[in-house]
Amino acid sequence: MEIGKTNRLKVTRTDRSGFYLADDEANEVFLPNEYLSKKLEIDAELDVFIYHDKSNKLVATTFMPKVQLEEFAYLQVKEVNKIGAFIDWGLEKDLLVPFAFQHEKMEANEFYIVYVLKDERTNRLIGTTKIDHYFIDKDVALEIGDEVDLLLMNKTDLGMKAIVNNRYSGLIFNSDLFKNVRTGDCLKGYVKQVREDGKIDLLLEPLGYRNSIDINTNMVLSALKNNDGFLNLNDNSDPELIKQQVGLSKKAFKRSLGHLYKLKLIELTPTGVRFI
C-alpha cells in the first residue's frame, strides 16, 4: 500500500461511517463515507488515493488529486499562513508547501510549479517549488523523435523550459517556438536531442513534420514573392495547378498554408492567398 498514490484495494468490512479496504498483504485503510463517490459491496475492488486527512489520519478516498507523489503540477495557492502555503490540489485537505521548501516566497491566489514528496520526518505528503533536484539526468530513457508529455515551466532567454514525462528537464528553443505557449500548459512534444548532461531539447511538432514544413513553407513564400505577394490558389484549387505554381502536392500546400496562417504571415481570401 503506497501513501500518496493510487492503489487498487478490496473492500473487506464496513461500519456506519465507511468501509475498510485491504491490499494483497492484508494492510488495511479506512474509506470514510464522505470520501466515497459510489456505492460499495464487500469484496468489491476499487482504485483509491491514500493520504493523511485533516485529522492527520491515514485514509482512502475515491476522489483523485490533481497530482500524486513524485509528480509535478501547476497549482494555485489558496492561502499562506505562519506554517507555509496551502495549495489546491483537488482534495478536501490542501497540500502544504512549508517555507523551507519554497524557491521564492509564495503568495495567495498565484500559481506555481509544484513537486509532491513525502516529508521524511512525518511521512506525510508535502509540496515543494525547489524542483530542480527532482529531475532525472542519468540513463534518460528517450530517443530522438519520441513523443513526450510536457508541462511548460518558465521562459528564459534561450526558450521555454519544460518538464518531460514527469521525470526530465527539457527546453524548447525560441527558434522552435511556433505557437503561443505559457507556463502551466500541458501538451505533446517531441525529442529533438538528448544532451550529455541529461537535459532534453524539444520540438512541438514531429521531426519529419518540421523538416518538411520548413522546406515547403519556403517554397510557398518564394512563390508569393515571385507573384507580387498573391497566389490565386486556395484549398479548393486543382492539384495540378498548385503543383505548377508552387511545386507542391495539394496536401503539402494546405499544410504549409496552415503553418503560415498560424504565424500570421498570410491572409486567406476567397480568391487566393495574400502575403501580409
Image (cartoon, grey):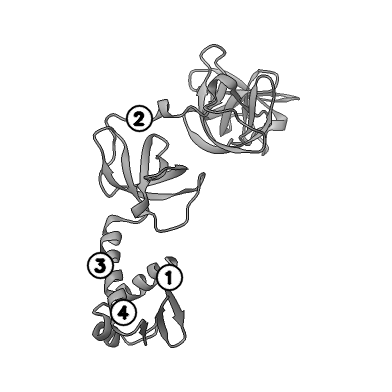
Residue 254 percent across, percent down from the top left: 36, 75
Residue 13, numbered circle: none
Q: Counting other residues with Cα less than 10 Å from the Cα at mark 1, is it few (<14), some (14-19), or many (20 or more)? A: some
Q: Is residue 21 left or right of residue 275?
A: right
Q: Which residue is mark 2?
A: 136
Query: If you read the primary sequence from the N terminus, does the residue marked by circle 3 or circle 2 appear first?
Result: 2
Query: If you read the primary sequence from the N terminus, does the residue marked by circle 3 or circle 1 appear first?
Result: 3
* Residue placed most toward the observer, 196 or 209: 196
Query: If you read the primary sequence from the N terminus, does the residue marked by circle 2 or circle 1 appear first?
Result: 2
Residue at the (37%, 84%) spot, across then down? 230
Q: Counting other residues with Cα less than 10 Å from the Cα at mark 3, is it few (<14), some (14-19), or many (20 or more)? A: few
Residue at the (39%, 69%) spot, across then down? 260
Q: Counting other residues with Cα less than 10 Å from the Cα at mark 4, is it few (<14), some (14-19), or many (20 or more)? A: some
Q: Which residue is mark 1?
A: 261
Q: Quadrant of residue 209?
A: bottom left
Q: Amino acid at mark 2?
A: Ile
Q: Which residue is mark 3?
A: 215
